[in-house]
Amino acid sequence: MQHVLVIDKHKQPLMPCHPARARALLKAGKAAVYRRYPFTIILREREDGNTQPIAFKIDPGSKQTGLALVADRQRGKRVVWAGELSHRGQQIKAALERRHTLRRFRRQRKTRYRPPHFNNRRRVDGWLPPSLMSRVHNVITWYARLSRFTPLTSISMELVRFDTQAMKNAEISGVKYQQGELMGYEVREYLLEKWGRQCAYCSVKAVPLEIEHITPKSRGGSNRVSNLTLACHDCNERKGKQTAAEFGFLNIQEAAKAPMKDAAAVNATRWRLFAVLKSSGLSVEVSTGGRTKYNRVRQGYPKAHWVDAACVGESGENIYLAPTHQPLSIESTGHGRRQRCRPDTFGFPKAHAPRAKSFAGFQTGDIVTANVPSGKYAGSYRGRIAIRFRPSFRLNGFDIHPKHLQLIYRSDGYTYMKGETASPAA
């Protein structure tokens, strides 16, 4: 179960408390709800207090990023809060491509006589495409929020999925890193990512996969990752001492040498995120995905982004994770569109966006409660509203007047749900 974040009467962060303790404080009137996401209470009378080290741990990903707060208590390290942050990089990329198409079409229609200009805009150092930079902004936003309500003392993040430099010369002997257990986890994580966590020959998923040599070692093959793939046990047995080409898969060797563009893009965002977090003044521990998986498997925890975040780095070796711990599922939705002109399919303007984003004190995405006294929809409701610039909003599929609404949580660019628990593996 998630712990509740606590701040004193001067809004200074204290140690998170158990939900039962928070309920008792709220019931006794000693605390009040300060924020719902992440759920935070403020103490009415208390100020200051003893705190213990808390690490903010991050497992950056392409579509989802795992977040975890790990408290270093006397009884050991414990996950007190966790979340899974879903990014909207693909939506941003699709929107930019639509804008690009419309602009090219308009240029061809109106200014085809003008010579085209390319690469005529300067980019600042460390520039990333908006679809990638949005991932960095999302994580930084949640770091800033959690640092306001939690006494953070350190940061741990997964900087790269796998150490490709250490895997290039796998035949070299005498290197302690490559002879240790961790090297095997680096290779497995790389292959799982590259081959989509399925058999390269029969494409079966959700079965135990084995590392398989495309060109067998008995035929002169090496242990380099460019000669490795994943295969289920049956395909590995049938292939035997044949090469992949002899086994009937001519494209396997080319696929093994192909670069991983998605992984490279994610690694770029991680380096940018690392640079920003480094400037926070806290100590930043970095590690690889292989190390994260090594820690998680040794402790018997299942695969989940927030679990991986808790297991990042050397500090993730001995982490207590309650079987009933339920993370917060966070989805980035943005703050609306900046596009002022709404074009049709052919790129011609058909409407213009309204100047204001709010009406009657509400905006689209706000979480509200509604108490309708009479009529067809009489009753109490709760949900997110979609505003119109007239006193008729949409809530749960029907129209409602704003006079019946009471604001619970103002839209902040994210939607929230309860995540799934990840009980330790048997």
Image: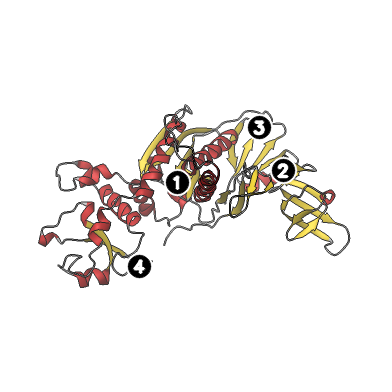
Q: Amino acid at mark 4?
A: Val
Q: Which residue is mark 2?
A: 354
Residue at 28% x, 53% y is 258
Q: Which residue is mark 4?
A: 207
Residue at 13% x, 59% y is 217
Rounded to the nearest angstrom, the CA distance separating label 1 from label 4 is: 25 Å
Q: Amino acid at mark 3?
A: Asp
Q: Position of residue 312 (x, y in %)?
A: 40, 44
Q: Which residue is mark 1?
A: 309
Secondary structure at numbered mark 2: loop
Q: Earlier in the sequence, mark 2 or mark 1?
A: 1
- Do labels 1 and 3 touch, CB within 8 Å? no
Q: Amino acid at mark 1?
A: Ala
Q: Which residue is mark 3?
A: 8
Observer-nearest residue: 283 or 387? 387
Q: Position of residue 231 (x, y in %)?
A: 27, 65
